[in-house]
């Protein structure tokens, strides 16, 4: 009995150990198998990738897949039987008839490598490599890089380093990405991304089923048209593009150890790059495509080009005009002559048109390309094939051209064929403009001389009667400037609506309206004076900003605001009704807004309780729309420079209106940024580059908007923020909670109480992420307001992961005790800035 007991124990031990011993570390031999439900896996030699059977929480189906071994957040990078899952937990993977085969519980194959032929009797082995490639090869083959089959030839939704996307011309294999059906279903989805070569020369296309939704632009020698797939250098990424008689492929490589990066095609149709950040224990999105409206395929139709810096974004190429039918796009003004008299207009920094009908010749230059196009009656445009070293090669388009967009920081020159009449018309218009400009200049010069002569004569007349004082000169100058501003505004706009006229009011009228500026009518006080509520004789309610007589900056601010705001009309901008100048008094008269300023609501306990999430979201949307108008849609590009909660007013319907344009600056459309020696604004809302170096741009307003958005969400002020963890300010607090995954602790408790739905929770989380994107430390990392509007309004658009915010300005280090100043602050340095000069310019 004793010996029998030992035997039983040994037999039982062998049975227990068999599953663990049945498979080698990184290979599967022809005598081994991998079984569903046994917890058996194959692990690459460096323990980077792991292969095994898996199922998803919402499904009982089983799949064979590969995922990262070292990363706790499981990310599947390849799925074998994505369209033929096992219906239950009974299934096996093994080598059979020179193929890898998955059998179901009844022994029926559900997936196979589908190889044909092979050497009889030659043993095979399947191996998982450290780059994630699952290969089938001969066991005794001395060349370890010769594979009979490899998973890298059959991509799913993920592109890993060393994977090739594109064509093997010898075998006809086209390696492409296909999305999952949805996040819980790895079966083939509707979206695919392919590298096409049959349309002329290589470019990437993205499809939704059979419909093209995105096109990268063709290969131009060193990049694709839109710099798709990391053509711009990143320190740990390199790329390779091959186009020869055997291959047309794109791949990328990782140049640093222990860095994991992948490109995926999501179930929503977005091409995204993610990189794993060990310190954050999360995948961070680095870029995504399509990025904006102009990335949509054929957005502007034939002969139209898309430009995000114009409104609307679609524009007709010179010599074309908008079609009057429903097909969209643009049509020629004048037919081509095809007799050698046509010419070309040069479009700079463009994504080249779709290459469906093109002729490519790498052996000729641009001049010969132009001559060939002129000789071909079907030619409509041409460009260089390769932009390196000054340009070479020739691409000729035949037929209509479409899917063109402007790339301010990329693209290449495109030459579009025009009739001679359209070219002459351009020259004629240019001559007329020059002549008109000269005439207007002479006229204005004469007017200026006459005005100065009249002004001098008027001053002499006044001098005889009474002494001249400085204040009188200032008021005269202001009155004349503002009167001219009002007349120019009305004349330029050619308005007949009295509501748009800027009134110059008498002091007595304003005093009567405000009950002689009584304290009972006082609405608030700012840095430049006091605001009063008033009622005119016709019953209209007004708000009067009475500038302080002691303010040295008041005159400049006053002129700047009146001149600027008179040009602006938008539902989310406060409307200036008039102004008043009298005996040293300078006053601005606005429309009265019943619900006062935003700060009186979000920072005041009683009023804050009335602001549910939907109201806060609508206010955020309105502020964003107002900024988009200032930055992009108004006649001028305007930087506000002092956006904050107290400068957002609310009407009776809680519609937000941006106010206080005394510090605003007008930019030219070609200007990116400006510099000032006199920094103005409010700490807590000022971007780092502005506070430290005086550099301001649209991104300065974006930073202020981000601060304001996080204040709306949290109900806390950025300035004067304090908590037990000694965060420098609200931005530091939000950033810390975001990294810790504790975003609920950011929210105003009132929002939590009023936002019970999953939809609203998702919306709030997106807004926190958008706010952090807007307050990123580097201006170039922040989105423009037009992109912010799209992100706020979209429920499906992927939002990039934010980088560290610029939260290190404004707190005196003496306010932080010695223990906190040396612990936990390795991410930033406290910089001290003294704001000693405030100036409207």
Image (tube, helix red, strand yellow):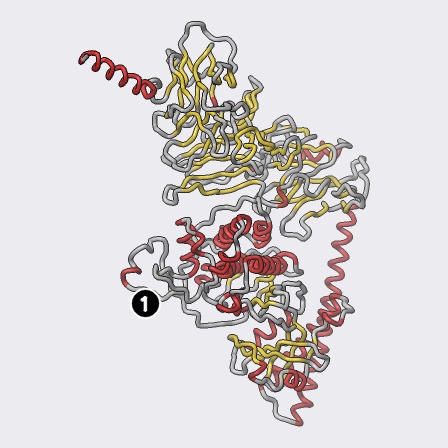
Q: Is residue 40 left or right of residue 574?
A: left
Furthest residue in direction front, as rendered: 1
Furthest residue in direction top, as rendered: 120
- In the rendered image, which quarter contains the N terminus? top left
Residue 647 in sight here: yes
**Residue at (76% x, 60% y) in the render:** 435
Residue 7 picture quarter: top left
**Number of marks drawn:** 1
Helix, strand or loop status at disc 1? helix
Indicate the position of residue 365 as horizontal and vertical percent values: 63, 33
Indicate the position of residue 80 as horizontal and vertical percent values: 49, 24
Say which residue label 1 marks.
Answer: 814
Residue 351, compared with residue 393, is above or below; it is: below
Q: Nearer the viewer, residue 336 or 57?
A: 57
**Residue at (63% x, 82% y) in the render:** 581
Q: Is residue 746 left or right of residue 452?
A: left
Residue 696 in sight here: no
Residue 694, compared with residue 216, is above or below; it is: below
Residue 830, compared with residue 325, is above or below; it is: below
**Residue at (54% x, 81% y) in the render:** 548
Neighbour class for label 1 at 10 Å: few (<14), some, many (≥20)? few
Residue 344, compared with residue 115, is above or below; it is: below
Furthest residue in direction left, as rendered: 2
Q: Nearer the viewer, residue 808 or 412?
A: 808
Q: Nearer the viewer, residue 121 or 480?
A: 121
Indicate the position of residue 595 as horizontal and vertical percent values: 59, 70
- In the rendered image, which quarter contains the C terminus? bottom right
Indicate the position of residue 350 as horizontal and vertical percent values: 63, 42
Q: Nearer the viewer, residue 370 or 826?
A: 826
């Amino acid at each position: 009995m004793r010996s029998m007991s030992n035997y039983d124990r040994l037999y039982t031990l062998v049975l227990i150990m068999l599953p663990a011993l049945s498979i080698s570390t990184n290979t599967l031999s022809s005598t081994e198998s991998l079984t569903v439900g046994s917890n058996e896996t194959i692990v690459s030699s460096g323990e980077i990738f792991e292969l095994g059977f898996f199922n998803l929480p919402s499904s009982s189906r089983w799949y064979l897949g590969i995922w990262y071994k070292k990363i706790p957040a499981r990310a599947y990078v390849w799925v074998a039987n994505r369209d033929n899952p096992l219906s239950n937990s009974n299934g096996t993977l093994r080598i059979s008839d020179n193929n890898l085969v998955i059998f179901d519980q009844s022994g029926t194959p559900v997936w196979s490598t589908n190889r044909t032929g092979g050497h009889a009797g030659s043993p095979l082995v399947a191996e998982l490599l450290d780059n994630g490639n699952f290969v089938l090869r001969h066991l005794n083959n001395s060349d370890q890089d010769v594979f009979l089959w490899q998973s890298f030839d059959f991509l799913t939704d993920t592109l890993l380093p060393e994977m090739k996307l594109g064509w093997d011309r010898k075998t006809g294999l086209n390696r492409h990405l296909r999305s999952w059906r949805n996040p819980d279903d790895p079966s083939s989805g509707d979206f695919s991304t392919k590298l096409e070569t049959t349309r002329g020369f290589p470019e990437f296309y993205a499809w939704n089923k059979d419909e093209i939704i995105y096109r990268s632009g063709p290969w131009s020698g060193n990049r694709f048209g839109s710099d798709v797939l990391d053509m711009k250098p990143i320190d740990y990424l390199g790329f390779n593009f091959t186009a020869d008689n055997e291959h047309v492929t794109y791949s990328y490589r990782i140049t640093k150890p222990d860095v994991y990066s992948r490109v995926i095609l999501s179930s929503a149709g977005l091409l995204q790059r993610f990189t794993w950040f060990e310190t954050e224990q999360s995948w961070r999105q680095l870029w995504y495509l399509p990025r904006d409206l102009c990335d949509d395929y054929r957005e502007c139709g034939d002969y139209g080009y898309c430009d995000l810096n114009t409104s609307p974004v679609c524009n007709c190429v010179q010599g074309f005009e908008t079609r009057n039918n429903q097909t969209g796009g643009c049509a020629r003004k004048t037919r081509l002559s095809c007799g050698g008299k046509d010419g070309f207009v040069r479009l700079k920094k463009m994504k080249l048109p779709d290459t469906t009908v093109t002729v490519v010749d790498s052996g000729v230059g641009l001049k010969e390309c132009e001559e060939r196009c002129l000789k071909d009656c079907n030619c409509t445009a041409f460009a260089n094939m390769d932009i390196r070293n000054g340009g070479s090669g020739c691409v000729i388009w035949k037929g209509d051209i479409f899917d063109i967009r402007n790339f301010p920081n990329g693209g290449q020159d495109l030459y579009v064929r025009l009739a001679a009449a359209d070219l002459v018309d351009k020259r004629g218009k240019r001559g007329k403009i020059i002549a008109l400009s000269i005439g207007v200049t002479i006229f204005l010069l004469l007017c200026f001389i006459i005005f100065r002569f009249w002004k001098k004569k008027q001053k002499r007349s006044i001098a005889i009667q009474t002494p001249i004082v400085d204040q009188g000169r200032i008021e005269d100058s202001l009155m004349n400037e503002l009167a001219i501003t009002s007349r120019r505004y009305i004349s330029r706009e050619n308005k007949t609506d009295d509501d748009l006229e800027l009134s110059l009011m008498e002091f007595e009228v304003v005093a009567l309206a405000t009950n002689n500026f009584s304290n009972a009518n006082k609405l608030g006080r700012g840095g430049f004076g006091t605001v009063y509520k008033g009622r005119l004789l016709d019953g209209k309610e007004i708000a009067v900003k009475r500038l302080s007589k002691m303010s040295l900056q008041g005159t400049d601010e006053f002129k700047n605001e009146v001149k600027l705001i008179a040009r602006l009309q938008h539902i989310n901008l406060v409307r200036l009704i008039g102004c008043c100048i009298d005996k040293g008094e300078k006053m601005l008269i606005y429309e009265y807004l019943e619900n006062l300023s935003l700060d009186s609501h979000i920072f005041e306990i009683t009023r804050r309780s009335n602001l549910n999430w939907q109201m806060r979201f609508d206010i955020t949307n309105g502020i964003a729309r107002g900024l988009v108008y200032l930055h992009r849609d108004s006649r001028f590009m305007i930087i506000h420079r002092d956006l904050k909660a107290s400068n957002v007013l609310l009407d009776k319907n809680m519609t937000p209106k941006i106010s206080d344009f005394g510090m605003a600056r007008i930019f030219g459309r070609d200007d990116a940024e400006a510099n000032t020696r006199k920094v103005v604004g409010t700490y807590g809302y000022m971007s780092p580059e502005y506070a430290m170096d005086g550099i301001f741009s649209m991104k300065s307003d974006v930073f202020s908007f981000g601060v304001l958005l996080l204040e709306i969400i949290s109900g806390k002020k950025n300035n004067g923020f304090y908590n037990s963890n000694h965060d420098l300010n609200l931005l530091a607090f939000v950033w810390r909670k975001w990294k810790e995954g504790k975003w609920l602790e950011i929210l105003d408790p009132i929002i939590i109480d009023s936002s019970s739905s999953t939809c609203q929770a998702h919306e709030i989380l997106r807004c926190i992420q958008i706010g952090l994107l807007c307050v990123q430390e580097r201006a170039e990392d922040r989105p423009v307001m037009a992109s912010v509007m799209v992100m706020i309004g979209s429920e499906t658009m992927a939002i990039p992961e934010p980088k560290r915010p610029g939260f290190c300005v404004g707190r005196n280090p003496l306010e932080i005790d010695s223990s906190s100043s040396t612990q936990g602050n390795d991410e930033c340095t406290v910089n001290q800035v003294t704001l000693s000069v405030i100036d409207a310019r």
